Image (cartoon, grey):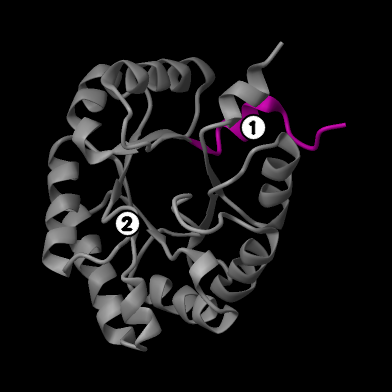
Amino acid sequence: MSRYTKAEILSKVDHTLLKPEATWPQVQTLCDEAVRYLTASVCINTCYVRQAAEYLAGRVPVCCVVGFPLGAMDTKSKAFEAKTAVENGADEVDMVINIGWLKNRQYDDVKADIQAVRAAVGDRVLKVIIETCLLTDEEKERMCDIVCQAGADFIKTSTGFSTGGATFHDVELFARCVRGRCKIKAAGGISTVEEMETFLDLGADRLGTSHAVRLLTAD
């Protein structure tokens, strides 16, 4: 027996379409599904934020990705993209850290990168993608502290565009290390209802997936 109702799970889902070939009609369908099933948000690329915000008219929050999927652009560019997204109607921003800087142990630069986007989005929700599949556990633990210190609302596992996605181990590590200082988003490769439930059990507050609506509303 499921530990959660379908509606409970869907209320935690950022209904996602980030493929580079995504068209406006596909994004429009995503928005329609999000409204029908009351997902936490739609998560899209920044080029569609204005259209989606106008189309949804506040019925479901618009989430977008910034510095995606590599995170390797300079900080001013990343912050400008975030600021523009908010001006166009984004309610939530999911940014990618500069992974190379983390590997270089440039911890102050990684933190400043997040803080610049935090300042750019103001009071909007900020989620920070650390791309766990490319990191050691020590680096993940370090990022839990940096993300919280930088004032982000969520730490997020993955883009879904690298070598791996969310794992149970990583969400357990996040829960242990953030200790309630920020929320947790599991994303990337989540493809079954059982996985969604387990991630929620382990401490995820939000799930990023393109599969949830299809799996949870199938007859």
Q: Residue at x 44, y 18 (%)?
A: 35
Please state the horizontal and vertical placement of residue 143, each as a whole percent of the image.
45, 76
Q: Residue at x 37, y 38 (%)?
A: 18
Please state which amino acid type lies under the numbered disc 1: Glu
| Residue 20 on the magenta segment | no
Please state the horizontal and vertical placement of residue 116, each as a whole percent of the image.
19, 67
Q: Up-down: is 42 above or below 203?
A: above
Please state the horizontal and vertical placement of residue 59, each as a whole percent of the image.
35, 21
Label 1 Cα crowd, 10 Å radius (few <14 / some 14-19 / many 20+): few
Q: Which residue is mark 1?
A: 8
N-terminal of the pair, mark 1 or mark 2, is 1
Q: Up-down: is 132 above or below 218?
A: below
Q: Residue at x 57, y 24 (%)?
A: 213
Which numbered circle lies on residue 59? none
> Which residue is at the far bottom?
105
> Separation of disc 1 and disc 2 at Cα?
26 Å
| Residue 11 on the magenta segment | yes
Please give the range of residues in magenta.
Answer: 1-14
User: Regarding mark 2 in the picture, which secondary structure is present there?
Assistant: strand
Q: Nearer the viewer, residue 162 or 147?
A: 162
24 horizontally vs 197: left or right: left
Q: Up-down: is 60 above or below 97?
A: above
* Image quarter of residue 154: bottom left
Q: Up-down: is 7 above or below 204?
A: above
Q: Which residue is mark 2?
A: 95
Q: Residue at x 80, y 37 (%)?
A: 3
Quadrant of the rendering where the N terminus is positioned? top right
Please state which amino acid type lies under the numbered disc 2: Met
User: Regarding mark 1 in the picture, which secondary structure is present there?
Assistant: helix
